[in-house]
Image: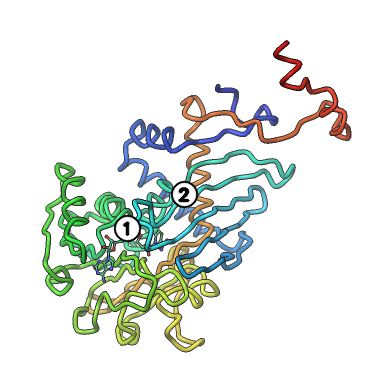
């Protein structure tokens, strides 16, 4: 079932997982990562327009369920997302998500979409946008620590936007590294599986940590981080869940998305409240300095912010027209007389009568 996008306000276009995968194939994953990255960068540049709030998180022993809302005044968006590190052992994803865009003027939804794949794409695109500003010049090698669901996306975005052509891989589960190596074979990158994180960081210009563990883990020790490296630490994104030895934060210049959220969820949750950070929107819009010199250690303490999901949702909405890669959902009650909601119910033919 396909009807005109948004022009028929009774229907809301819905992008299923199946259609999102078809969209990825029809656009091409590298082009899609570059496209989402450009929307993310554009929205960082107009940061001050957005309504911003730390995400609303419901924690349990097993994980977290979060709502991530924002608006630029014309369009409103939110994402529902979970994070359950124990899920993979039960054959389930650590992170799943869906999201919605709505028209601020009418309040009507204009897009509903799966966001598990889209989150992986937007997280990778965000990492690469940030690395464009912070990674050392001429970076070609990235250590990828944590080779789970997000990892291939991270690798490809760094290839497309930052010119990374060599990956040094480590995961505590060698099967994850084997899976990554299989998936990225033939995609134009040299893949070097490593036995330890120490080995993986040797010679790396960028180190991405993307591990899942609901605890203060030490994926990287201070002595593993040399001068000039850019750290892209994105796995620690919850209270009580971090990846880096705190000493690293004292040697690095730390860059964040939205401080009120990162101070609760990011690596800096282990630092004093006034620990100095630079906001990425300021770097991207030229109001703050990014990388200063070749010896500086830069650290992106990425937790994922609502504007990045908003950017990804906008991108998807702009690609859909004419593709047919969506279904129209009948999720808005739309009586001819807006005040006659009850009459609409009375006039509806019960299924039992319709069958006779
Ligand atoms: P996943 O469970 O699919 O993969 C995580 C991998 O980390 C697994 O293969 C696991 O074996 C490995 N691992 C765990 N501890 C390790 C360690 N000490 N050293 C090396 N490897 C280790 O999870 P995922 O979907 O890839 O997500 C990874 C993390 O990224 C999660 O914590 C998730 O919450 C976070 N995340 C952050 C953002 C963001 O915007 N910052 C977005 C999505 C996911």
From the viewer's perspective, tell me whether residue 166 is left or right of residue 297. left
The answer to which of 56 and 228 lies nearer the viewer is: 56
Residue 241 pos. (x, y %): 40, 74
Picture residue at 76% right of the left edge, 22% below the top: 350
The response on whether ligand 1 sits within 8 Å of label 1 is no
Q: Which residue is mark 1?
A: 89
Q: Is residue 120 above or below residue 260?
A: above
Q: Which residue is mark 2?
A: 39
* Quadrant including the C terminus: top right
Picture residue at 56% right of the left edge, 65% below the top: 55
Residue 69 pos. (x, y %): 60, 57
Kindly state the secondary structure of the residue where label 1 is placed: helix
The image quadrant that residue 62 belongs to is: bottom left
* Quadrant including the N terminus: top right
- Res 69 visible: yes
Tell which tag, 1 or 2, sits nearer the viewer. 1
Ligand 1: quadrant of the figure: bottom left
Picture residue at 13% right of the left edge, 54% below the top: 191
């Amino acid at each position: 079932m396909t009807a005109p996008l948004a022009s028929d306000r009774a229907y809301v276009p819905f992008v299923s997982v199946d259609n999102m995968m078809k969209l990825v194939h029809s656009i091409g994953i590298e082009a899609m990562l570059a496209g989402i990255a450009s929307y993310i960068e554009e929205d960082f540049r107009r940061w001050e327009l957005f309504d911003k709030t730390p995400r609303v998180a419901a924690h349990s022993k097993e994980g977290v369920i979060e709502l991530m809302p924002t608006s630029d005044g014309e369009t409103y968006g939110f994402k529902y997302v979970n994070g359950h590190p124990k899920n993979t052992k039960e054959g389930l994803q650590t992170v799943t998500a869906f999201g919605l865009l709505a028209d601020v003027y009418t309040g009507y939804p204009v897009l509903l979409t799966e966001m598990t794949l889209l989150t992986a794409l937007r997280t990778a695109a965000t990492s690469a946008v940030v690395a464009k500003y912070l990674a050392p010049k001429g970076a070609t090698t990235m250590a990828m620590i944590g080779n789970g669901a997000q990892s291939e996306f991270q690798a490809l975005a760094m290839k497309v936007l930052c010119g990374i052509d060599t990956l040094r891989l480590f995961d505590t589960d060698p099967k994850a590294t084997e899976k990554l190596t299989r998936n990225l074979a033939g995609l134009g990158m040299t893949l070097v599986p490593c036995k330890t994180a120490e080995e993986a960081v040797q010679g790396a210009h960028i180190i991405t940590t993307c591990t899942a563990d609901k605890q203060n883990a030490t994926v990287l020790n201070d002595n593993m981080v040399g001068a000039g490296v850019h750290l892209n630490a994105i796995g620690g994104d919850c209270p009580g869940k971090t990846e880096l030895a705190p000493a690293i934060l004292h040697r690095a210049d730390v860059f964040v998305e939205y401080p009120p959220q990162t101070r609760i969820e990011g690596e800096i949750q282990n630092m004093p409240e006034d620990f100095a950070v630079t906001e990425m929107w300021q770097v991207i819009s030229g109001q703050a300095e990014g990388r200063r010199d070749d010896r500086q250690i830069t650290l992106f303490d990425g937790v994922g912010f609502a504007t990045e999901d908003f950017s990804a949702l906008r991108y998807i909405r702009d690609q859909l027209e004419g593709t047919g890669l969506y279904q129209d959902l009948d999720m808005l009650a739309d009586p001819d007389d807006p005040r006659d909601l009850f009459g609409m119910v009375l006039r509806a033919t019960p299924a039992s009568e319709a069958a006779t």
